Image: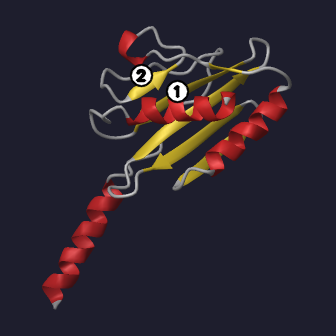
Amino acid sequence: MKAHYLFLLSILFLLNACTGTRPTNIGIQQGKFIDCPDSPNCVNTQSDQKKAQIEAITFKGDWKETKTKLLKVLEEYPRTTIVKDDGKYLHVEFQSALWKFVDDVEFWIDDKAQQIHFRSASRLGHSDLGANRKRMEKIRAALQG
C-alpha cells in the first residue's frame, strides 16, 4: 500500500514540475516583447527570427471593444489563467491537459496601428510540435471571423 502512495506522489510531483516557474523578464519594454529563445516553441509578432515570426492580429474600431472580444475568446479556452491585465497588455497562461505544461502568452494592443501584437512561448522543453502557433492562429480566426 505504501508503494502505491509513493508512486502517486511521484506522478504528482512530475506533473507539477512540468509547469515551470513563471517568467519575470516578460512584458512590453520600449514597445517590444523579449525575443523568442532559439528553441522552436515560441512565436512573436515582433520577431526578426524567421522561425518565430507570425503576423499580428488586425482590428478596426475601438481598442477597448477589441480587448473585450479578446477576453471572451480567451474564456473559451480551458485551463487558461489571466495573470496580468494592465490596460493594453495581457499576460495569459495556457496549461496542457495531460502533462500540465504551461505556455506564457502576452498580448499588446497597439491602438494606433490597430494591431494586437503577441508572443506565445512554452515555459519548458524544446519543441511544442507547433502548439503555440496553432493556438494563436485559432485566436486570430476567432477575433477576425
Q: Nearer the viewer, residue 93 or 58?
A: 58
Of the residues under marks 2 and 1, which one precedes in the sequence? 2
Question: Which residue extends farthest bottom?
Answer: 1
Question: Which residue extends farthest right?
Answer: 62
Question: In 3D space, how far apart are the residues under numbered discs 2 and 1 (Cα atoms)?
Answer: 8 Å
Q: Amino acid at mark 1?
A: Arg
- Quick check: 88 left or right of 101? right
From the top left corner, tell me how far across and down residue 20 is, in percent. Answer: 38, 48
Q: How is the image coloured?
A: secondary structure
Considering only vertical position in the picture, is 98 above or below 143?
A: below
From the top left corner, tell me how far across and down residue 113 is, in percent. Answer: 74, 11
Give SS at disc 1.
strand
Q: Residues within 10 Å of mark 2 (few under 14, many from 20)?
A: many
- Quick check: 83 left or right of 5? right
Quickly name the residue at label 2.
Answer: 36
Q: Quadrant of residue 57?
A: top right
Q: Residues within 10 Å of mark 1 (few under 14, many from 20)?
A: many
Quickly name the residue at label 1.
Answer: 119
Quadrant including the C terminus: top right
Quadrant including the N terminus: bottom left
The total of numbered circles placed on residues is 2
Asked whether residue 1 is in view, the answer is: yes
Residue at (40% x, 11% y) in the render: 49
Q: Identify the disc placed on residue 19.
A: none
Q: Quadrant of residue 122?
A: top left
Residue at (18% x, 75% y) in the render: 7
From the top left corner, tell me how far across and down residue 90 is, in percent. Answer: 66, 36
Q: Amino acid at mark 2?
A: Cys
